[in-house]
Amino acid sequence: MQLARSLRQGETTSEALTEAALTRARAAQDDLNAFVTLCPDEALAEARSVDAERAAGAALGPLAGVPMAHKDLFCTEGIRTTCGSRMLDNFIPPYDAHVVERVKAARMPVIGKLNMDEFAMGSSNENSYYGAVHNPWDLRCSPGGSSGGSAAAVAAGIVPGATGTDTGGSIRQPAALCNLLGIKPSYGRVSRYGMVAFASSLDQGGVLTRNAEDAAALLQVIAGHDARDATCINAPVPDYLAELRTPLEGVRIGLPDFGDGHAIAPAYRELLEACIEQLRSLGAETVSVQLPNADLGIAIYYVIAPAEASANLARYDGVHYGHRCENPADLQDLYRRSRSEGFGEEVRRRIMVGAHVLARGFYDAYYLQAQKCRRLVLRDYQSAFTRCDVILTPTVRAPAFRLGEKLTDDPTDLYLEDLYTVGANLAGLPGLSMPVGFVDGLPVGVQLIGRALEEGRILSLAHRYQQHTDWHLRTPPGFSGDGA
Amino acid sequence: MSASFDLDYLAQLMRLNIKPEERTGIEEKLGSVMEMIDQVVQADTEGVEPLAHPLEIHTVLRSDIPDEPARSLRDWMQDGGAPETEDGFYTVPKVIP
């Protein structure tokens, strides 16, 4: 929003901002590996066109001319969209995702496509065919995932905002590990049209920015009904920037009483308490709430998400688009080799888990049972929201971990990264993570979960908090880009 | 219960090949995931209806307006969108021997 104001006041041009963003992206690429593709020609052409229209006195939207970047899972017409996978290394979509159309209509130059875990499956961005992304706060560490490129690019000040997607925590966890505000809207708030599908009943597009005001402005651009996604909610989108000004007085914040499995380090606990205290001092009230099935969340998620993924990824057959093996002997060989070569280890594992939980003899015990458990989780939230307006939890279990540290023989170590975040996906609720301080020099976040379609309320809480704290203003040493 | 998965069957369902040297590693890692998801099997869900979707929305209808893509699917396929085409058709290895 700061850049948008500078543009409106004629202090700078979109071309200068876009050129600077591209320069920062190139300079940081060796350190961060945040981008899969840069789009300098398209971005600069759009920037110049916005500048010319502004000079001619045209009425432009509030973010017109401000550069941004998309997670490489939103289809971009004529621009490669890889989803972090060898399978889509050569995929050039024939159309734009709804989110991409909206960003174009807002006249924001898109400087490139951001690295991510393959098909958004991962919490460390180490599952990308294009290599791991590094955390600007400590290059030895993971930025989180799957929207790791988005988080690294915004944290490093390359762009002021980026899109991401969140199926189990893929916006909020990297936001927490990179000192950003990341919001996953309610399921259905943002169209999934043109978003490469992972788990269709959980996937939701959102944004990562430095602060709540920028998140509100960018969410305003991408939220809203689109008939091409039958699950997209047809309800008016409120004015999120106006909602930021809602007073905190009387807002009831629910504090869940988790079991031992949810323990966090004392230093993180202190930051959480300080955040709660700050919100109380601004007029919020706190109540304790119960989420008795929270411990089941990860297990439910790892039945439902792989099941849906196993069906969604059946489309990659080596025939229609994407990777095709050389010299197939017959049709089965074409399928099997194309898929075995095109998918990475984590993707292959997850779709096989999906096949297992959907297989005859296991369907009732796993998939149907997980859907029943999912209703229990939804009921927990419904019951909690009779006592409170917003639920506050840690976003993560700990700050960023070293790259390679969780690549162990047990993949479930990494799955626990989503412990606090999967609940909002299972229940379809909006959730955000905001910066609340540092543990051992690395950022951590607090998660705010709202009732369905109450994105404005959680953003306003974050905004009020950010007006009285400066955690979100801190930037990683060595990356002092002015993309804020 | 989940300990009894058949790797070859799952690989066949998902049209994947398992390299012999990867087999043990894949089985071990799959095994730990299966063990973890076993928690849902144990949960008490007596009388609970399954929830397939967070919104429980109903099927919606939209107007049947044809898209007007910038270029036809056939052009896109032939311009490299599809890995292998002939005369505007996808090609696959011979299916009928």
Image (cartoon, coloured by chain):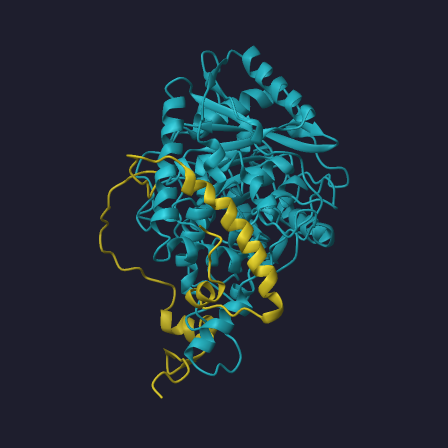
Which residue is painted at 57% across and 52% down in the image?
A: A117
Q: Give residue A455's position: percent from left, percent from top.
A: 44, 30
With respect to residue A226, does B16 lie above or below? Answer: below
Outermost residue on the right side: it is A478
Between residue A334 and residue A206, name the one nearer to us: A334
Q: Give residue A400's position: percent from left, percent from top.
A: 67, 39
With respect to residue B50, does B30 lie above or below? Answer: below
Q: Quadrant of residue A271?
A: top right
* B43 relative position to A89: left or right: left
Between residue A134 and residue B96, name the one nearer to us: B96
With respect to residue A248, does B81 lie above or below? Answer: below
**Is any atom of residue A79 visible in this view?**
yes
Q: Quadrant of residue A377?
A: top left
Which residue is painted at 47% across and 49% down in the image?
A: A104
* A316 relative position to A267: left or right: left
| Display colour for chain B | yellow
Q: Give residue A254's position: percent from left, percent from top.
A: 47, 20
Which residue is painted at 42% across and 58% down in the image?
A: A355
Q: Quadrant of residue B77?
A: bottom left
Where, quadrant-wise, is the C terminus of chain A in this rendering? top right
Q: Give residue A418's position: percent from left, percent from top.
A: 54, 39
Where, quadrant-wise, is the N terminus of chain A in this rendering? top right
Between residue A458 and residue A386, name the one nearer to us: A386
Which residue is painted at 61% across and 49% down in the image?
A: A410
| Display colour for chain A | cyan
* A95 relative position to A401: left or right: left
Count of numbered marks: 0
**Is any atom of residue A75 visible in this view?**
no
